[in-house]
Image (tube, rainbow, N blue to C red):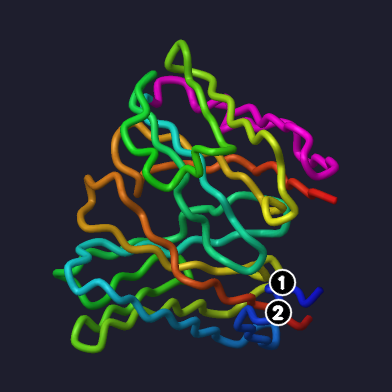
Amino acid sequence: GESVGLHLPTLSVQEGDNSIINCAYSNSASDYFIWYKQESGKGPQFIIDIRSNMDKRQGQRVTVLLNKTVKHLSLQIAATQPGDSAVYFCAETPSTGANNLFFGTGTRLTVIP
Amino acid sequence: EAGVVQSPRYKIIEKKQPVAFWCNPISGHNTLYWYLQNLGQGPELLIRYENEEAVDDSQLPKDRFSAERLKGVDSTLKIQPAELGDSAVYLCASSQKAAAEAFFGQGTRLTVV
């Protein structure tokens, strides 16, 4: 049968280029957002987070941008490396202390050497 | 420090057979989560434990799925009988408090034939 994975949004970038992965969320009450990286055969791994009172947060080679007006989140990866190849998920939660975490549809990033 | 450990990594069973997955959370993490991840999609919560108590099992299909965490540490997720549509990755995660702080195991990939 048809693989659901074939419908996974994909992004291919050349090694050394910057990557931008986008995510739209639906719950305007969400207060806290997280980006996860999931490599093949592994569980999701925390990359970076941002609270709703911020519009930008930077980490090492990664930046998350939050636009609450249009309920949009993006992850920017600078100087993308082959090791960045993975599926990236955004997740939202009502607050930092909440026990509900809702994942969006992932994006498969492929880095071309 | 060991992360969240799951076993088995892979399981192939015939439909209508039972199957069980095991999870050992990070030491000291009172909250344990079981997630279902279909191919190409983000994880979806099945059940959440606070110590030995299942505090959120609203998404667990109770006609065929069951879980336990008898001593508030290790947990087992069972499916009986398995159906073809149960083929997916079953992820276990644990945290001290909030879902956003959870660490994920590598998952068990179940294939029902």
Residue at 62% in and 60% down: B38
Q: Can you identify the residue that label 2 sits on?
A: A111
In the rendering, at what x and y percent does residue A76 appear? 46, 79
Disc 2, disc 1: CB below 8 Å? Answer: yes
Q: Is residue B54 rendered to the left or right of residue A66? A: right
**First reached walking from the N terminus: tag 2 or tag 1:** 1
In the rendering, at what x and y percent does residue A70 appear? 25, 88
Relative to A95, does residue A92 appear above or below in the rendering?
A: below
Label 2 packing within 10 angstroms: few (<14), some (14-19), many (20+) = many
Q: In the image, are marks 2 and 1 on the same chain?
A: yes
Output the chain of dot 2: A
Residues in magenta, as a range: B1-29
Q: Nearer the viewer, residue B27 or B39?
A: B39
Q: Is residue B29 rendered to the left or right of residue B75? A: left
Residue B105: quarter of image:
top right
- Amino acid type at image mark 2: Val
B24 within the magenta span: yes
- Mark 2 vs mark 1, CA separation in Å: 5 Å
- State the SS at label 1: helix
Residue B81: quarter of image:
top right
Residue most toward the left?
A53
In the rendering, at what x and y percent does residue A1 appear? 81, 73
Q: Can you identify the residue that label 1 sits on?
A: A82
Residue most toward the top?
B71
Residue A8: quarter of image:
bottom right
Output the chain of dot 1: A
In the rendering, at what x and y percent does residue B43 appear? 52, 56
- Amino acid type at image mark 1: Pro
B87 within the magenta span: no
Location of the N terminus of chain B (image quadrant):
top right
Q: Is residue A20 rendered to the left or right of residue B7? A: left
